[in-house]
Amino acid sequence: MASLLRPLLRRATKSPGQSWSRRYSSQAPRALKISPVVTGLSGLAVGLVAARLLWKRDDDSTPKSSKIRDTLVYGSGEEFNNAIDDMRKLFSGRLHVVSTDSDDLKLHGMSTNTYHAGVDHSVVVYPESTEDVVKIVKIANQYKMPITPYSGATSLEGQFIGHPGGGICMDMTSMNKILEIHEADADVVCQPGLGWMELNETLQSKGIPLFFPIDPAPDATIGGMASTGCSGTNAVRYGTAKGEWFLNLTVVLPNGEVIKTRRRSRKSSAGFDTTKLFIGAEGTLGIITEVTLRLAPVIPTTVASVQFPDVKAAVDASIQIMRSGVASSIQCVELVDDAFMAATNKYGVSQHKYIISDGLFFKFQGHSPQSLTETARIVQDICATYGGTGFRLAKDAEEAHDIWQDRKNAHHSGMALLPGGKGWATDVCVPVSNLPALVLSTKKDLERIGLPYTIVGHVGDGNFHALLLFKNDEELELVKDAVHRMVERAIELDGTCTGEHGVGIGKREFLVEELGAGTVGLMKAVKKTIDPLGLMNPGKLYPDDDDAKNDGHGSHKEE
């Protein structure tokens, strides 16, 4: 069937000598044409039917997904060496595209941001275009060599750690260009290696009063942000990467085919939302090579901080504020615990000193100084009714910047509490009303094990982060068990094992419990259909079959 459909569908092609260039909305559209997503959808439909037929037992019953275990066979060491040789020949006319330098391999296979043990890659390649990615993927197919995408290296759950058997690390940092800016349409087309802060700085420098509001770690890049389905402090006002901020993606599929998930229009009801298929897929379904982002208008802001007697009072105040008439003027509302405030007083970016207690950080937005002042007054009054004290409104833009940098520097301030130590940074998310119970039980548990920690959270959407510090393997086991208990509590409270950080290696074991065996089985079916060789970031996101702890959410137990 696919062979009959394929000649009718356009493929991704590029004329010889055609170059990538930066254009603005006043210029003609780019000549490069990407095949419509219908190509990939037809393959997906055919593949899912085929997969269902192949997975049937002799008695014509379909096995539960938790019992399916396909053995993937990758190339040998000799074949991997041949693949590296082929890539060297392919890119021989350009310097520094293919690297087997030992330091480079180690750097790309580990991170000081994560507790996961590093695994070196076999080779690091630096593509500069979609065409480069296609060529690399086709070589990977020929030699059955796994591919791990890499960009900002800020992920916290081991998403870019190498495959134990070796593989290709595809470093997207050379693909960091803004290709088109459409100011009138409030969108921008860029490559995946571009940092979100670089994008916003470029827009500001050009006098364009727009910005991209998703704000994870400062060094995060657009491709990684899409792949992990990230968010940040602005989520309470602007949502997450799984909202409508990623209008479309250009993706190189595991077989080397190029698709574009949709056109640039602000909305579309044409078929499946295939853009979201790749958002949160953590590089397991393809390599993102181009992104169209929706932008938001820049609105004046200021910040404030306030302390509370306990976490429950702080969260209750935030819930009341987000139900009030000034909710639309709240860009961020951040929960911070007493341990974080103590760390910030010692190691914060600014010279400000805070009361050491649980508290909230706010960022307000408004069209005028008067509207900002009025929002702050109403918020202060609400906080006071819940025992809030020490309400501090920034007196100018410089102080606002300093206060907010103290919040954004949370990870580094927390790490400084244990010199020479390591940190396990994790996050969970629950319905906002359940957040006080979760935070209080987590703090009680962490106090019991006696290791240093800090807690911060995007309280407006029920998401909080814990940074647990340790020095040795014995303490690491204590931390691991504490994180496991925290995740279990979050799921019991109708929450998720990760609100922002993604799954990677660290959270795979919880997916069946959270989503149900049926949903995880569907995810695996899509993966096996799109990537039958299992080349794209293997070992990440999808739980092993023996991680199936239950088959809730409507799944049926085996007879």
Image (cartoon, rainbow, N blue to C red):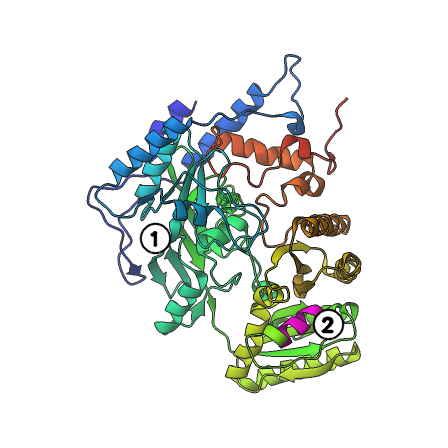
State the CA–CA distance, disc 2 to disc 1.
Answer: 42 Å
Highlighted magenta segment, given as a residue range: 339-345
In the foreground, 403 or 200:
403
| Residue 413 locus on image (x, y percent) | 59, 68
The relative height of residue 295 versus residue 530 in the rendered view (above or below) is below
Q: Main secondary structure of the magenta part?
A: helix
Amino acid type, mark 1: Ser
| Residue 71 locus on image (x, y percent) | 55, 24
In percent of the image, x 39 and y 48: which residue is there? Answer: 104
* Circle 2 residue: 358
Does 127 lie within the magenta span? no
User: Relative to residue 169, is residue 236 drawn left or right?
Assistant: right
In percent of the image, x 70 and y 48: which residue is there? Answer: 477
Looking at the image, can residue 329 be seen?
no
In the current view of this chain or complex, which residue is farthest to the left?
17
* Circle 1 residue: 174
In percent of the image, x 73 and y 74: which residue is there? Answer: 357
Amino acid type, mark 2: Asp
